[in-house]
Every structure is written in structure tokens, then in C-alpha cells.
Image (cartoon, rainbow, N blue to C red):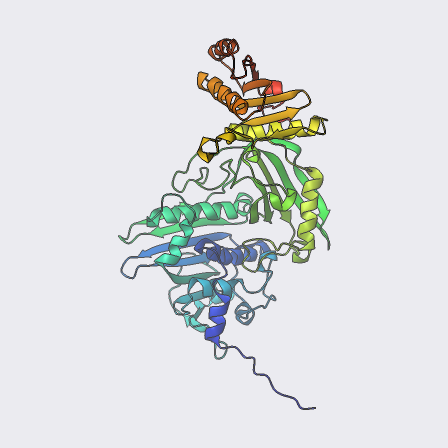
Amino acid sequence: MNIITINNQPSAEELWAGIGGHFDNLGQIINEFLDNSISNFAANPSVNRNLIVSLKELQSTNQVEISIEDSGTGIKKLDEAFTLGNTNAGESPLNEHGFGLKHALASANPENSSWEVYTRTDEDYDNNSFKKISAPYKIHDFQALVCANEAWPGQLSGSGTLVRFTCSWEMFKTTARGIRGGVTSFRTMADILCEDIGFIYAGVIASGGASITMSIENSDGIKERKVVGAVEPDWADFIKPGSGMEQVDLGSGKVDIEYKFGRINEKSLRKEFDNSTTRKYYMKNMSSSGVEIRINGRVLCYNLFKEIWGIEKHNSYNYLLVVLNLKSQNKDYLPKTRTSKNGLREGDPKLEKLYSWVKSNMPEPKKDLSLADHETDLFEELRKNKELFNPDPNKLITTEMQVFKSTGENKDRVRIDLYEKTSYGVTIYEGKKETTTSKDVYQLRMYWDGLVFDGIIPNKGILVAERNPESVKSLIKIVNTMRDANDKNYNFEAKTWAELGINLSRPNTN
């Protein structure tokens, strides 16, 4: 048997290109560096817990210089920190994979040309020295410079680490991705980053796990410093099971789950660098409700709904927020994160067990129909109720029934809000969420006339809303004295949603 040697040594250039690009935006890249610092704080509780995120607009090159500096212990083992996949240097579950620092640098600076890492331990600080590691990343002959009697390039004193890189303006603009209106201002994008950091690390900031400051310098040299506050929900009240903590074994050992199940108020619209206000988070809408999962205060995923309950997001669930904070310093006890830490790994048994725990406490969220933005949603709920509670095996209850079909012209067709055919006859519905008007009476009459035109005999028409004015009720009485094409009196009546079993008040979930 012959043996063939396989040369599988990667080139640094190809490796750098391959490990970059795993993040959706610049904010996620910066989070990787923040994760390393916060992990160091958690593992060394005696150190100061200061972080500075610096942004400097370089108009001459159409780039942005970014740095993240901490007051931690410094990197003590450079070999482990700069080796791909090495988890020996990991100090908390946020260092689960051993790729974060390298992934983030390769994504921020794909050219592998303009990044630097400065670090100093207490011993280095006492000796007035620090270490510098800079681009390009190499597989062989990769070196660190020991800088003695030189000025520290950062703003903090004592031990710590500074990561600095230059990114393109296009990369910097990814901080504003998804924001309506097309943000172009450097300062506004810095504010968006401030809000994102305040949301992602809200639990860390609120508990004193880190103090984060932003240092901002625009192309005119104007400098600002802003404290990053925690972005937190404005709770209206809590719903069963409320708020508290429970120890749960997700598969390998018990973790503490801090939980809050509740209703939220919509937060105030954003004021720049004021994290008590928001433009993205806790807006009581379909993109900021549902379930939020944190690990030791750091968001891993949020806006979960279908993943847990198997039902689609809807405006009537916008009130609901469930915040889970999983507390453990043992990564083996926790659900696995994605390598880029912008989510948890679907299919992981521990995550599935966490989903089951949520469902055991809230089998299915209740709808708050007062949040429905259109009567279409209310008629769909009414249809479901009638399907559920009407025992007639031959019933036909639909929101898809059209009239004037017999004209042969598609443009003549009109959809009835709700059509109900049972052994008692045909009932049709027209309605508004809040208040009906005289026009709605004639809309209901058009449905009736359309059915007659198509050869169907209606028996009753119901006009429904939260409120029907006396003027509408008077008009219904007048119309009921009139006759249709079959020489039969119209038979209309006004009802409220509550009379039809649709409760527009806030659901009782306690």
C-alpha cells in the first residue's frame, strides 16, 4: 500500500478571503470585538470595565477609521488568540468558536491591509511597553512587535486592548441598512450604531458588566463623546407567567432563565444618542415583538414567533414581548450560537428545549384584536368563530364570495366582507373596525343586489362596527322599507363587534 502526502496548507490570502463576509452589517462586526472585551471583563471581575468605540470620518479617502478599546487584562496568549478555531483563549460563552477576532477583521478589512491590534498586560504597562499586531495576517512568519517607551495609541490607561481598522464608506453605510428614508449622514449612522449597541448589550450595560462610550469625529474635526445607554422595553404590564427566574436543564446542565412575559408600550421616537428613545426596537410592531433570547445579557436573536408557535406574525400580536436571558458561564449548558453570533443554531436540541419551555408557559399567544389595522382581520376572526361553533355540516362561511359574477366581466365583481350560508339561509356582512357611515349601508345594499342579480336569495344583511351612529340606524330603517329586484324587502340590521363575539378590548392573559 502506497501513501500519498496531501498538502492542505492554505494560503493566508485565500484563508482571509474565505473567513470574511459572514456578517450582515458593520454593527455585527463591531459586536465581535465587543464580545471579546466583555468576555474578558466577565472572566476578570477585578478589572475596570470600560469600552470606547471610536468612529473617525476620513473624507479624503471616503473611508471610516474605527477602533474598539477596552480596559481589560490585555491579550496574554497571542498564539491562541490569533489561531483560527482555537478556543483555549476563550473566557466566556461569547468566545464559543475561536473564530470571532479573525472573522471580524477579515470582514471589516477584506484586503488584509489596514488593521492593527494593540495590547498590553499589567506587566507590559509597568514596563512602559505594549505589543502591536498588524496586517497582513499570515500563516507563516506572523509576528508581533514589542513597542517600548512609545505612546499608547488609545485613550485608556492601564492594561487593555485596542483594535483599529479602516473600512470603506460602503461598509460603514451597512449600519443603516433597513432604515427608511435612505440615511447618508455620518452622525446619523453613528447614532444608529449607538442604538444597536445599546440594544444588543442592554443586559450587560444595565447590570454593570460594561460601560460603553462612543467617540465620534467627523471630517471637519468636530469631536463628540456619547455614553451608550441600555435600550430597554417600556413594559405596560406582565402577563402569565409574569417575570422571574427559573433553573432549567436544557440538556447538559442547569442554566438560570431570567424571563419576562408582558405587554409593551410603544417607545418614544428617536432622539439622537438618547437610548431611552428608539427608531428600531420595541416599537410595538411586527418587527419588534415576539420572543427575544439573550445569553448573559447579550442578544442572540429576537422577533421570534413562527419558530416557536408555528403561527405567522400579525398586528394583533404586536403587544407581546417575551424576554429570556440565559445565565451561565458554561457554554456546554447553553444553545449553540452561529459562528458570527448573529443568531442561534436552529435544530440544536438545547434551543428546541428552550422553545418547548416557552410553549409550556404560553401554549399560544392570545390576539389583541384592538391592534388589528383593518376590518379584514376582524372578519377573518369572525369567520373562524362561525366555522368553529356552527354545527351545520353543509355551511359555507367565506370572505372570498364575490357578486355580479353573472355579468361575465371581472371588473364588475365585488367581494363581500363575509358571506354565510347555513340551513337558516344566507347572511351577508359589511363593516368597519370603528364606525360605520351611510356609505356602508349602500355598500351592504350593493352586495344584496349583486346576489339577487346572480340568482341567490339573501335573507339578512348585517352592518357591523365598534359603533354604529344613530344616523346609520335611521338610514337602515328607511332602506328596509324598500324592495329588491325580487320584490322582497331588504332586511338589514346594525351590530357591534362585541355582539358578534369579537372583543376589541385588550385580552385578559393573566
**Can residue 257 be seen at all in this image of the molecule?**
yes
Horizontal and vertical percent position of residue 50? 48, 52
Give the answer, above or below, for where 71 lies relative to 322.
below
Question: How many numbered marks appear?
Answer: 0
Q: Quadrant of residue 388?
A: top right
Front position in the image: 82 or 408 = 408
Horizontal and vertical percent position of residue 345? 61, 55
Horizontal and vertical percent position of residue 178? 43, 47
Horizontal and vertical percent position of residue 159? 48, 61
Left or right, 30 with respect to 261, comes to left
Residue drawn 67% across the image and 42% down it: 358
**Can residue 373 be seen at all in this image of the molecule?**
no
Front position in the image: 16 or 437 = 437
Q: Quadrant of residue 115?
A: bottom left
Quadrant including the C terminus? top right
Left or right, 137 with respect to 336, comes to left
Q: Quadrant of residue 136?
A: bottom left
Quadrant including the N terminus? bottom right
Left or right, 169 with respect to 495, comes to left
Give the answer, above or below, for where 440 lies relative to 70.
above
Residue drawn 61% across the image and 44% down it: 306
Residue drawn 45% across the image and 74% down it: 13
